[in-house]
Image (cartoon, coloured by chain):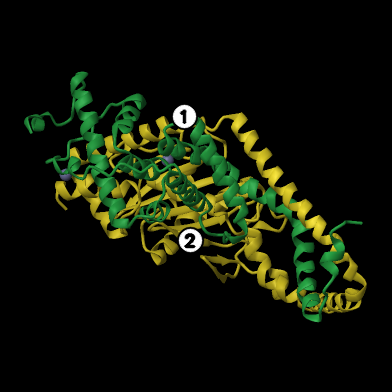
Amino acid sequence: MECRNFKELLDSYLCQELAVETNHQLLNHAEHCPPCRAEMASRRNMREALRRACSQDRLSEEACDRLRARLRAEVSASESLIGRRQRWTSLFDLRFAIPITVTAAVLIVAAVVMLPFLKSQTTPAQLFELSEALLSEAASDHHKCAPKFIQATRAAVMPSTVEPTYVGLEKVAASGAEGLRLHAAHVCAPDGRRFAHLVYTRDGALISLLVTERDKRALKIGNLPSADVSLAGLQEANLKNLSLGAFQTPKHVILVVSDLPTAENHKLAQTLASPVVEHIRKLDGQSVAALPQYRFDDGLTVLIASLRKGER
Amino acid sequence: MNADQPTLVGGDSERQTKTKKKIKILIGNSAQNTQQKLQTFEAQALGFADQLFRVALRLCRDRAKAEDLVQETYLQSWRSFHRFELGTNLRAWLYKIMFNVHYSNQRKDRLHLVPVEETIAETLAYDPPTPQRLTEAEVLAALERLPRDFQIPIVLSDVEELSYREIADVMEIPIGTVMSRLHRGRKILRTELVNYARESGYKVSNMAKRGE
Ligand SMILES: [Zn+2]
Ligand SMILES: [Zn+2]
């Protein structure tokens, strides 16, 4: 790639609009061309300044209250309309009471019969599926933060001032990181969510290992499931040309994000993350269990361990 | 007893009763769920109010008008929330509704967007290197000076982080137009900032191209 092409493509790179191969070429060029590297940093800096400047404008509290009040007024208006209609339809209640009861009874029986079937189909995926918000925050952290460190030459060590769980994370990860070059170890929060972040490269591919708190917002269903978290296996997703793989411990989510193809990221996620997952599971108070995996397909490809009880 | 009941009940044929039964079941559901639905809507959608407001400010260039636009957007989207498919991008959907409302307001006011001056960016022969140091105020001032047709895609892309495809959907313009406006808009923005940096004596990383 030439410098001219680099500059033409740079903005689209920063917007995550480029294909994986082009991302590679761009990062490769930046690695070897100091002026382009500087330009990348300047444009990133400019984007961040623009974002900060525009984010200062906020809807006032009063305007927010007015908005809520208007929504409520709208709802109570439509409810009174419904109420009025319901009063006249109640005249038909007697006539329809029997057929409706019969229908309801049939439905209830059907539901009870279906229940075990439905349950075994949906429970594991629903309990452990990570929220799209978390996945996109992880992807965005990788995209915004990791490229800054491709050139880092100093030895990367997690500062001792971070959360105790994250201290020494790069040493824990080392046994799974064979063939990878570590460029950074820190805690960052470009979009508000805090991540412990290890930045690696392998043959020009940029790889992030991210650890974050498994809070309510991390899971799709919102509430933290009480089920045994060791049942959750590797979950995978693709977002904006990035591949993600995620593991869970009782209190944390461990993600491997890269611009590698899904299959390669899958392999890498397992080797790179496993010592970290094991380590954090111990800290979170749970032992690891080797578990089978099965597959769900609803937008995200989710690989997740089956419920052991259901199998026996 | 309500006075309008007899007229509603009267003229009852078998066909009508069937439709009424259907209505009743539907209504029974919605009456129970409306409050719950509003809570879901508020929980999911109101979090984007500040982001919508930022873009509304660029569209209206007036705080009061921007607040009205955001309010109108939320009322509209609440009315069609049942049409929103969960799992798709709620934020992009809200932006789309906001642009719709804005476009139709403009038609009402008989106001029209000033056509883009297509020539501005063509005169930019080279892509200037971005200044290394710049303040938020400088960037904001440069953005304000951009024609609105360039400004809005830049804010949607760089600040709100919508994809090019989403911007095209939201603004109802072809994706090619989005890309060329972004490309040229960013060039103008950088040129402005370089000029500013030069005037205030900041070191620009590539002074060699100064004569251009
Ligand atoms: Zn170069
Ligand atoms: Zn980071």
Query: From what the image shows, is residue A248 above or below residue B124?
Result: below
Q: What is the chain letter for disc 2?
A: A
Q: Residue B10 sits in which quadrant?
A: bottom right
- Residue that label 1 marks: A56
Earlier along the polypeptide chain: callout 1 or callout 2?
1
| Residue toward you, A90 or A51 | A90
| Residue toward you, B9 or B95 | B9
If the picture is divided into quarters, which one holds ligand 2? top left
- Residue that label 2 marks: A237
- Comparing marks 1 and 2, which lies closer to the viewer? 1
Q: Residue furthest left?
A: B211
Q: Secondary structure at mark 1?
A: loop
Give the color of chain A as drawn. yellow
Q: Are marks 1 and 2 in contact (CB under 8 Å)?
A: no
Q: Residue A241 sits in which quadrant?
A: bottom left
Image coords of residue B73 (percent x, y): 54, 46
Disc 1 within 8 angstroms of ligand 2 (CB): no
Looking at the rendered image, the quarter that the C terminus of chain A falls into is bottom right
Gap in Å between the C-alphas at discs 1 and 2?
Answer: 33 Å
Instruction: Name the amino acid type tagged 2.
Output: Ala
Q: How many marks?
A: 2
Same-chain check, marks 1 and 2:
yes
| Residue toward you, A198 or A107 | A107
Image coords of residue B85 (percent x, y): 57, 61
**Residue under the image location 22 percent in, 24 percent down:** B197
Q: Which chain is green?
A: B
Left or right: B183 as drawn, with respect to A224: left
Inspect this view and state whether residue A18 appears. yes
Left or right: A101 as drawn, with respect to A289: right
